Amino acid sequence: MVQLTEKDKMIAGELYRANDDLLRNERKRARRLLKLFNDSLPDETAKRAATLQELLGALGLQAEIEPPFFCDYGYNISIGDKFYANFNCIILDCAKVIIGDNVFLGPNVQIYTATHPLTAEERNKGLEAAKPIIIEDSAWICGGVIINPDVTIGKGTTIGAGSVVTRDIPPDVFAAGNPCKVIRNLA
């Protein structure tokens, strides 16, 4: 029987221990790259692009992220073409985060794949889990939105400022609120 590593468990969406040495070292690697990116000058576009290419799992053409940007690992993030993220984007990428083409994130958008057990007994054991997030093509995520684990936001959808997305949102709608819900169809 093959023993799964904590990283294997994390990627599989199972409970895992984030304080594992391998995961801790991978987060340190991401922090070093993020420091280079976040400390870069506005005209150092080639340096920024190279740093993001090294950090992220995939980065499309004409993708731009305004510093400061923060993530856990980077390698679980796949970004499509013509992507834009405004200041203070946070992506906790313990699971896959897949972002399509022509997606725009306002300032202070937070994308959380990480989750923790609801019971104190399990949390006190140092266990956590992660569930993927998908943002489909041409979505607009307005400022201050929080996207929780295990959510898909449909193609062409707009999420209103300050919303907390706790469940899937269909394509071509305007959705807002806490919890986020469909307000009207856009198609």
Image (cartoon, rainbow, N blue to C red):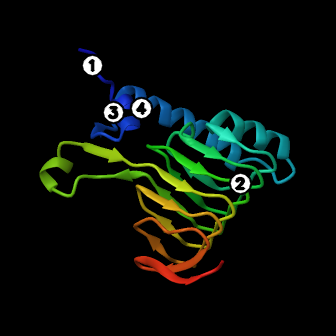
> Which three-letter amino acid code belongs to the residue tagged 2?
Asp
Quarter of the picture holding the C terminus: bottom right
Q: Residue furthest right?
A: 43
Q: Specify the label residue 101 is tagged with.
A: 2
Q: Specify the label residue 9 is tagged with.
A: 3
- Mark 1 vs mark 2: give the one in front: 2
- Mark 2 vs mark 3: give the one in front: 2
- Please, what secondary structure does the residue beneath circle 1 have? loop
Q: Which residue is denoted by mark 4 in the rendering?
A: 23
- Mark 4 vs mark 1: give the one in front: 1
Residue 3 occupies quadrant: top left
Q: Give coordinates of residue 32: x percent, y percent.
A: 60, 37
In this rendering, the answer to whether 78 lies above or below 152 is: above
Pick the residue in front: 43 or 58: 58
Q: Which residue is denoted by mark 1 in the rendering?
A: 3
Mark 1 or mark 2, earlier in chain: 1
